[in-house]
Image (cartoon, rainbow, N blue to C red):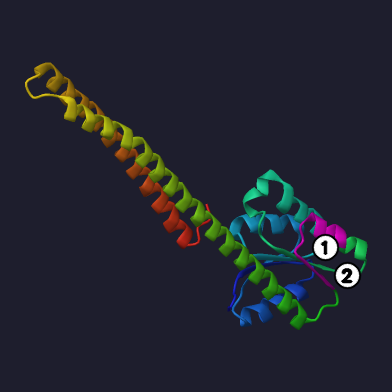
Amino acid sequence: MTLKGNILIVDDEQINLDFFDVMLSKLGFKVNQATDGEEALKKVKEINPDLVILDNIMPKLSGWEVTKKLKHEEEYKKYRDIPIIMFSAMDDVKDKIEGLELGVDDYITKPFNFSEVLARIRAVLRNRELTKQVLRREKRLAVVESLNNSLVFFTQHIKKPISQLIENAENTKPENRAKVIELIESIKREGNEILATIGGLEDEINELQGRDERLKRGDMS
């Protein structure tokens, strides 16, 4: 599975930004840059990246603060599933655990090896794609289940009125005008209710089919 993506690199050292821009662009990734935590949050809203790679020690907002906002604040709820890889000059296990608990998906300690970073980028993107596939499958199954439930409900509730109409017709003698008129009115009434139910079912089927088509295109909403 070949994975490319739209990556946001956040670092206050321009040399690192330029390095990753050149290296990742050559490999087919689309690279965006930010030089501090506040700019990173703005860029996330602008481009909705597939992955954020950010330094921890940055001006204005640290990598931890950016992560906390993206993963836990209501303002950034729609971006909560964007994976994050954090760079840090620190090699303290406690610091790494704190970052992971905040929602960081992976952690790279500076000085880094680009081959290792690339492998981690691909692994995170692969995990994200697999997660999206699972979610799409689950949502499509939910669509099918909803449609099945609607069909079961319809068939269960249409049997009784139709059976009653058949029974009334069998028990109504042609010469009994009052009964015939009553039967005709009953058929009209039940027929209209059945048509209304069918119309509602058709609307629900159309809505479910539209949702299924959106899921096929990768729209998770």
Outermost residue, left side: 175
Residue 91 drawn above or below residue 138:
below
Is label 2 in contact with label 1 (beta carbons under 8 Å)?
Answer: yes
Tell me where the magenta segment starts and ends, as one range. Answer: 97-109
Q: Is residue 87 visible?
A: yes
Quarter location, residue 135: bottom right
Tell me the residue at 26%/36% (across/down): 195
**Other-residue count near label 1 (Cα within 10 Å), few / some / many at <14 / 14–19 / ≥20:** many
Percent of width and height locating residue 73: 72, 46
Tell me the residue at 68%/81% (across/down): 23
Percent of width and height locating residue 152: 40, 44
Outermost residue, top side: 178
Q: Of 53 and 216, which appears nearest the observer?
A: 216
Distance between the alpha carbons at the discs numbered 2 and 1: 8 Å
Secondary structure beneath label 2: loop
Magenta span contains residue 122:
no
Q: Of 110 and 141, which appears nearest the observer?
A: 141
**Other-residue count near label 2 (Cα within 10 Å), few / some / many at <14 / 14–19 / ≥20:** few
**Hey, what amino acid is under mark 2?**
Ala
Quarter location, residue 104: bottom right
Q: Which residue is mark 2?
A: 89
Question: Is 177 displayed left or right of 165 in the figure?
Answer: left
**Hey, what amino acid is under mark 1?**
Asn
Q: Of 141 and 153, which appears nearest the observer?
A: 153
Q: Which residue is mark 1?
A: 56
Tell me the residue at 59%/79% (across/down): 28
Percent of width and height locating residue 83: 69, 62
Residue 42 drawn above or below residue 167:
below
Question: Is 14 displayed left or right of 30 in the figure?
Answer: right
Percent of width and height locating residue 58: 82, 61
